[in-house]
Structures are given as structure tokens and as C-alpha cells.
């Protein structure tokens, strides 16, 4: 199970993506720019999970699951909860 201190502060995600793993599950959290419905640019955190053993770049897109979160401390906490939930699915509720 991941804890909040294992994910970096919000400022880290302004410049880099974070990759990690939890048992069979790999995960990534990073900043993404997207266009909102009204045409404005919006910054979000994009969380991605996939089963190893391959890294993000070598895993086919159809084997990855992604979810958007607010680019804020609350978004990091929501991503953490989602990673832990998905980790239980990938790892059979261990931990």
C-alpha cells in the first residue's frame, strides 16, 4: 500500500512524471495539458496503471488504464487512493 509521503509534492509534477510499482502493478503520475470544453487550456494530473513487467513506453495503450485528477494536493491524494485500489485488484488484495 502506498502512503502519501511516497508521492512527491505538487511542484515536482510541474516538470517531471513519477513512475513506480506496487507488486504486479506499475503506475505513473504526471502533469498533462488538455483543452477544456470551452477551449481553454487546463492542467490536470494524469494517473496511469498497467500490469508489469514492461515499462510505460513499452506497454501497449490498450493495456493501460488512465484517470484524471485535479492538479492540486487533493488530486495527488485522490490518485494515491486510486493507485491503492487498483493495486489491490492487480495483486489480489495483498497488503
Image: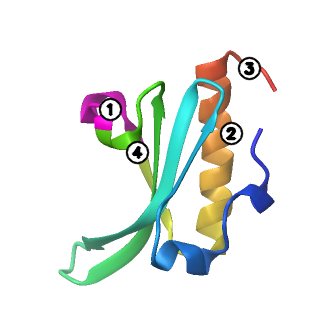
Give the structural element (helix, strand or loop) at label 4: strand
Dot placed on the residue nearer the N-terminal end, 4 or 2: 4
If you read the primary sequence from the N terminus, does the residue marked by circle 2 or circle 1 appear first? 1
Q: Pointer 4: residues within 10 angstroms few (<14), some, or many (20+)? A: few
Q: Nearer the viewer, mark 1 or mark 3?
A: 1
Q: Position of residue 83 (x, y in %)?
A: 61, 42
Which element is circle 2 on? helix
N-terminal label among 1 and 3: 1
Crowding near pointer 1: few (<14 within 10 Å), some, many (20+)?
some
Residue highlighted by disc 2:
84
Distance from disc 4 to disc 2, alpha carbons, whole Å, reads: 14 Å
Q: Which residue is mark 4?
A: 66
Image point (47%, 69%), residue name:
16
Q: Earlier in the sequence, mark 4 or mark 3?
A: 4
**Residue beneath the point at 77% across and 20% down:** 94
Which region of the structure is painted magenta? 58-65
User: Does 91 lie within the magenta span?
Assistant: no
> Residue under circle 1?
59
Q: Is residue 90 above or below residue 37?
A: above
Gap in Å between the C-alphas at discs 1 and 3?
A: 24 Å
Label 3 belongs to which residue?
93
Judge from the rendering whether residue 69 lies leftward or rightward of residue 21; answer left or right: left
Mark 4 or mark 1, which is nearer the start of the sequence? Answer: 1
- Location of the C terminus by quadrant is top right
Q: Nearer the viewer, mark 1 or mark 4?
A: 1
Determine which quarter of the picture holds residue 31: bottom left
Identify the residue shown where x is 53% and y is 36%: 26
Q: Secondary structure at mark 1?
A: loop
- What x and y, as percent, mark residue 71? 51, 73
> Marks 2 and 1, Cα distance to the nearest angstrom?
21 Å
Check contact, mark 4 vs mark 3: CB within 8 A. no
Rendered residue at 52%/72% (across/down): 13
Amino acid at each position: 500500500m502506498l502512503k502519501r509521503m511516497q508521492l512527491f509534492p505538487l511542484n515536482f509534477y510541474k516538470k517531471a512524471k513519477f513512475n513506480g510499482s506496487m507488486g504486479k502493478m506499475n503506475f505513473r503520475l504526471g502533469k498533462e495539458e488538455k483543452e477544456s470544453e470551452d477551449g481553454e487550456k487546463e492542467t490536470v494530473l494524469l494517473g496511469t496503471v498497467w500490469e508489469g513487467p514492461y515499462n510505460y513506453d513499452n506497454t501497449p495503450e490498450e493495456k493501460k488504464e488512465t484517470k484524471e485528477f485535479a492538479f492540486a494536493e487533493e488530486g495527488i491524494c485522490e490518485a494515491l487512493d486510486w493507485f491503492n485500489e487498483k493495486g489491490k485488484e492487480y495483486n489480489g488484495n495483498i497488503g
